[in-house]
């Protein structure tokens, strides 16, 4: 069973549904506004949200998922993706672009 999944940006609702189907124990969303963070936690039932506009993603991710990330779903790429990939558990590295 997967423990932690990280999801970024567009098609977020679909990805959260996929995470649920995979049996993820914890789902962490990454957004750019507080409104989106509130929406995904309050309306979609996401475990936690990281706001890229006012939080250090790598540090916050270590707090929320100290054992690492099992699945990382991303359709953006870039430096933020690179920092998250460094925290993906090597034995269960599943990235969906």
Image: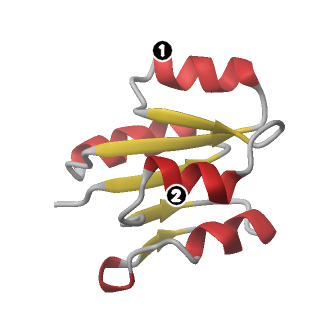
The single residue placed furthest to the bottom in the displayed view is: 91
Image coloring type = secondary structure
Image coordinates of residue 20 in percent, x first then y, are 28, 41
Q: Residue at label 1?
A: 42
> Is the residue 91 above or below the residue 57 in the image?
below
Quadrant in the picture for residue 27: top left
User: What residue is rendered at 26% in x and 49% in y?
Assistant: 24
Quarter of the figure that contains the N terminus: bottom left
Query: Could you say whether the residue bearing mark 1 is in a helix, strand or loop?
Result: helix
Write the residue at 77% across / 43% down: 52
Q: Position of residue 96 (x, y in %)?
A: 50, 67
Quadrant the C terminus occupies: bottom right
Residue at the right extreme? 53
Q: CA distance from mark 2 to mark 1?
A: 22 Å
Residue at 41% in and 59% down? 66
Report the front residue among 20 and 55: 55
Q: Mark 2 sits on what residue?
A: 62
Of 59 and 7, the residue lying toward us: 59
Q: Secondary structure at mark 2?
A: helix
Using the image as rendered, state which of residue 32 and residue 13 is in the foreground: 32
Horizontal side of 35 relative to 1 (left or right) equals right
Task: Give the numbered dot on residue 4.
Answer: none
Farthest residue in the left direction? 1
Badge 1: few (under 14), some or many (20 or more) residues near its Cα, within 10 Å?
few
């Amino acid at each position: 069973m997967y423990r932690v999944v990280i999801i970024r940006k567009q098609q977020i609702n679909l990805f959260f549904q996929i995470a649920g189907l995979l049996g993820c124990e914890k789902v962490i969303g990454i957004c750019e506004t507080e409104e989106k963070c509130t929406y995904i936690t309050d309306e979609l039932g996401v475990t936690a949200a990281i706001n890229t506009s006012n939080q250090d993603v790598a540090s916050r991710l270590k707090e929320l998922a100290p054992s690492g990330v099992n699945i990382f779903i991303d359709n953006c790429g870039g430096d933020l993706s690179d920092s998250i990939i460094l925290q993906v558990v090597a034995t269960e590295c599943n990235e969906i672009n």
